[in-house]
Image (cartoon, helix red, strand yellow):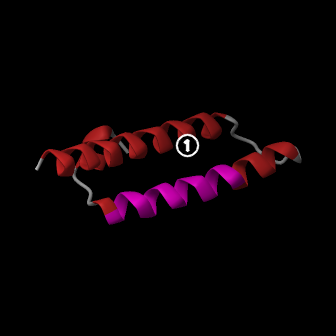
Amino acid sequence: MKKVDYNKMTQAELTEKLDDFKKELFALRFQHAINQLDNTARLKAVKKDIARVKTALRALELQSAEQ
């Protein structure tokens, strides 16, 4: 997903997405450790998605603090 898509989500949706990405990252790291991961680029992509979600959550946090 792109940054624009995350900015349209609510805080609850973003938190749920973040949990999903963290679970996926854990599974990918486990597969990588036992040499069953075919697409290692997915690790980097999931890390970037986690960062995007955290950035969107922080932006919502700052918006609510301003009001």
Residue 14 position within the rendered picture, expressed as x and y whole percent measured from the top left: 37, 57
Residue 28 position within the rendered picture, expressed as x and y whole percent measured from the top left: 71, 49
Identify the residue at image location x=59%, y=53%.
22
Specify the segment rendered in magenta.
12-26
Identify the residue at image location x=46%, y=38%.
51
Vertical side of 6 occupied by 15: above or below: below
Residue 26 position within the rendered picture, expressed as x and y whole percent measured from the top left: 69, 53
Identify the residue at image location x=31%, y=39%.
3
Residue 19 position within the rendered picture, expressed as x and y whole percent measured from the top left: 52, 60
Is 44 in front, or is 36?
Answer: 44
Q: Main secondary structure of the magenta part?
A: helix
Quarter occupied by residue 4: top left
Vertical side of 40 occupied by 7: above or below: below
Identify the amino acid type marked 1.
Val
Left or right, 61 with reference to 28: left
Residue under label 1: 46
